[in-house]
Amino acid sequence: MGLRDFARSLRPGNDRELAATQYAGQESATDRAARLRREQQRNQGSKRAATQGTKWETADRARDRRGGTRLTNWRR
């Protein structure tokens, strides 16, 4: 953004024109924040599911090692 564009952006009442010309095609700050928030929630959900799966696998292997009471015992 040049000095002339910067000076033009300081004039009052020019917001709609700037949005239509200078900032056309750019993501707004609000849209960007919402997108990042959605991505973060999606990432946290997948991490949580992976952690739960790992805990279940660890417990299942420990039961197998102890010879727990399961319908199928793969060791025998």
Image (cartoon, rainbow, N blue to C red):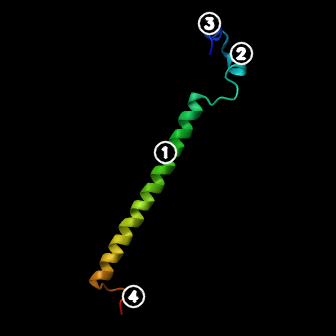
Residue nearer the viewer, 71 or 29: 29
Q: Earlier in the sequence, mark 2 or mark 4?
A: 2
Residue beneath disc 4: 74
* Quarter in which the N terminus is drawn: top right
Q: Amino acid at mark 3?
A: Ala
Q: Amino acid at mark 4?
A: Trp
Q: Earlier in the sequence, mark 1 or mark 3?
A: 3
User: For numbered disc 2, what is the local secondary structure?
Assistant: helix
Image spot of residue 55 (x, y percent) = 36, 66
36 relative to 3 in the view: left or right? left
Residue beneath disc 2: 17
Image spot of residue 50 (x, y percent) = 43, 61
Q: Earlier in the sequence, mark 2 or mark 3?
A: 3
User: Within 10 angstroms of label 2, few (less than 14), some, or many (20 or more) residues?
Assistant: few
Residue beneath disc 1: 40
User: For numbered disc 4, what is the local secondary structure?
Assistant: loop
Of labels 2 and 3, the one closer to you? 3
User: For numbered disc 3, what is the local secondary structure?
Assistant: helix
Q: Earlier in the sequence, mark 1 or mark 4?
A: 1
Of labels 1 and 3, the one closer to you? 3
Give the residue drawn at x 65%, y 7%.
4
Above or below 44: residue 35:
above
55 relative to 66 in the view: left or right? right
Residue beneath disc 3: 7
User: Within 10 angstroms of label 3, few (less than 14), some, or many (20 or more) residues?
Assistant: few
Is there a contact, CB below 8 Å, between mark 2 and mark 1? no
Give the Cα separation between the discs numbered 3 and 4: 76 Å
